[in-house]
Image (cartoon, rainbow, N blue to C red):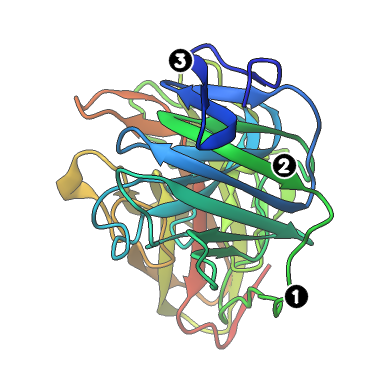
């Protein structure tokens, strides 16, 4: 842990008799390993958090906009808290902590002392072991980032020590985890061209694109990851993303869907708006379960289908509501999922 090996703007290095390779303190931001790349194997290190923040390590890092982020939020309740350790991909500059709420968990983390983290990546799967526990605190069956190889960086405020990288050590074999979509989950979408948000910030049926729709596949569990599909937005103006699916029904009737989304969603069925909802982290009393993050059942919506072909369009923008109530383009998760609770006698295409 020396300046010859690491680069960081707010990073200091110090020898210590108890740590033969020295200590690296990152008071703010990141420190980047200057040499080498990493694809799979084992990375382990010791970390002493200096604040309640997202402190941890970035793997498969191409640049500030692309990485796999594994981090902890150290507090005395960590063993019981469901957000003590977390995994989030960083894609197109968006750190998707709120899109992957299932990849967070309690862990035996010491809030104000040293913690040993061991991360094992094999065949696209990531497992995180905390403080020599025999079972992983996090198990991610399929990494969601854009790169399968890249550099390493760490994020403070924290002190780091004893980092070891073993590219050939993929750990003991573990049973494969497979995402199996529930019946009625929309897996195959059409993705429309991204459009600037209207002056009101609210899309209408008149804003739905008429051309240039492209095939877009959701993840195996049905999550349509817009943050991964849409390039980074460097403009101060927010954007609208569009997803479309056609539903063939054998008869008229209302069908219930489970709708998951971050941060906002509007549904248009056969040219008419049937739902509008928000899932922002601020204000706290407006957060949808689970805690302002994506969930497969953030909302339930009734769709009045008619016999024959129906067209369902989902619009979502990249807005982020600050604590003061103002908006800016989102740098976090952007995703949606739809599942028909009773898909019998429906054809989705």
- Residue 145: x, y in percent? 67, 45
Q: Is residue 208 left or right of residue 260?
A: right
1 or 3: mark nearer the eye: 1
Please tell me which of labels 1 and 3 falls first in the chain. Answer: 1
Please tell me which of labels 2 and 1 falls first in the chain. Answer: 2
Q: Which residue is mark 2?
A: 146
Quadrant (top left, top right, bottom left, bottom right) of the C terminus: bottom right
Q: Nearer the viewer, residue 24 or 310?
A: 24
Helix, strand or loop under label 2: loop
Q: CA distance from mark 3 to mark 2?
A: 24 Å
Q: Is residue 16 left or right of residue 171?
A: left
Q: CB under 8 Å between callouts 3 and 2?
A: no
Helix, strand or loop under label 1: loop
Q: Nearer the viewer, residue 8 or 256?
A: 8
Q: CA distance from mark 2 to mark 1?
A: 25 Å
Q: Nearer the viewer, residue 326 or 269?
A: 326
Q: Which residue is the extreme one toward the left? A: 285
Q: Which residue is mark 1?
A: 173
- Residue 82: x, y in percent? 34, 61
Image point 59% across, 55% down: which residue? 118
Q: Nearer the viewer, residue 109 or 113?
A: 113
Q: Is residue 193 above or below residue 101?
A: above
Q: Indicate the quadrant where residue 77 lies.
A: bottom left
Label 1 neighbourhood size at 10 Å, few (<14), some (14-19), many (20+)? few
Q: Indicate the quadrant where residue 185 lies.
A: bottom right
Please tell me which of labels 3 and 2 falls first in the chain. Answer: 2
Identify the disc placed on residue 236. Answer: 3
């Amino acid at each position: 842990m020396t300046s010859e090996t690491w680069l960081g703007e707010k990073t200091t290095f110090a020898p210590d008799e108890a740590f033969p390779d020295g200590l690296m303190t990152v008071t703010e931001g990141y420190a980047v390993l200057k040499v080498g790349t990493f694809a799979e194997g084992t990375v382990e290190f010791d970390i002493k958090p200096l604040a309640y923040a997202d402190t941890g390590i970035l793997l498969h890092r191409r640049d500030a906009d692309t990485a796999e982020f594994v981090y902890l939020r150290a507090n005395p309740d960590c063993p019981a808290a469901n957000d003590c350790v977390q995994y989030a991909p960083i894609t197109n500059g968006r750190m998707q902590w709120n899109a992957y709420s299932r990849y967070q968990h309690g862990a035996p983390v010491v809030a104000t002392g040293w913690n040993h983290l061991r991360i094992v990546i094999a065949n696209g799967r990531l497992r995180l072991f905390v403080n020599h526990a025999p079972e992983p605190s996090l198990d991610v069956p399929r990494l969601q980032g854009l790169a399968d190889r890249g550099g390493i960086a760490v994020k403070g405020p924290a002190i780091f020590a004893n980092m070891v990288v073993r590219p050939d050590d993929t750990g003991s074999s573990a049973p494969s985890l497979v995402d199996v979509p529930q019946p009625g989950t929309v897996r195959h979408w059409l993705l429309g061209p991204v459009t600037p948000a209207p002056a009101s910030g609210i899309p209408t049926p008149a804003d739905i694109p008429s051309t240039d729709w492209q095939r877009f596949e959701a993840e195996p569990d049905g999550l349509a990851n817009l943050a991964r599909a849409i390039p980074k937005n460097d403009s101060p103006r927010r954007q609208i993303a569009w997803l479309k699916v056609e539903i063939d029904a054998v008869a008229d009737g209302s069908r219930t869907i489970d709708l998951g989304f971050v941060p906002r969603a509007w549904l248009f069925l056969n040219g008419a708006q049937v739902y509008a909802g928000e899932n922002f982290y601020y204000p706290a009393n407006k957060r949808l379960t689970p805690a302002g993050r994506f969930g497969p059942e953030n909302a339930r919506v009734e769709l009045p289908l008619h016999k024959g072909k129906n067209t369902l369009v989902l619009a979502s923008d990249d807005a982020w509501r600050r604590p003061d109530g103002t908006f800016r383009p989102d740098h976090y998760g952007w995703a949606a999922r739809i599942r028909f609770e009773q898909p019998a006698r429906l054809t989705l295409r």
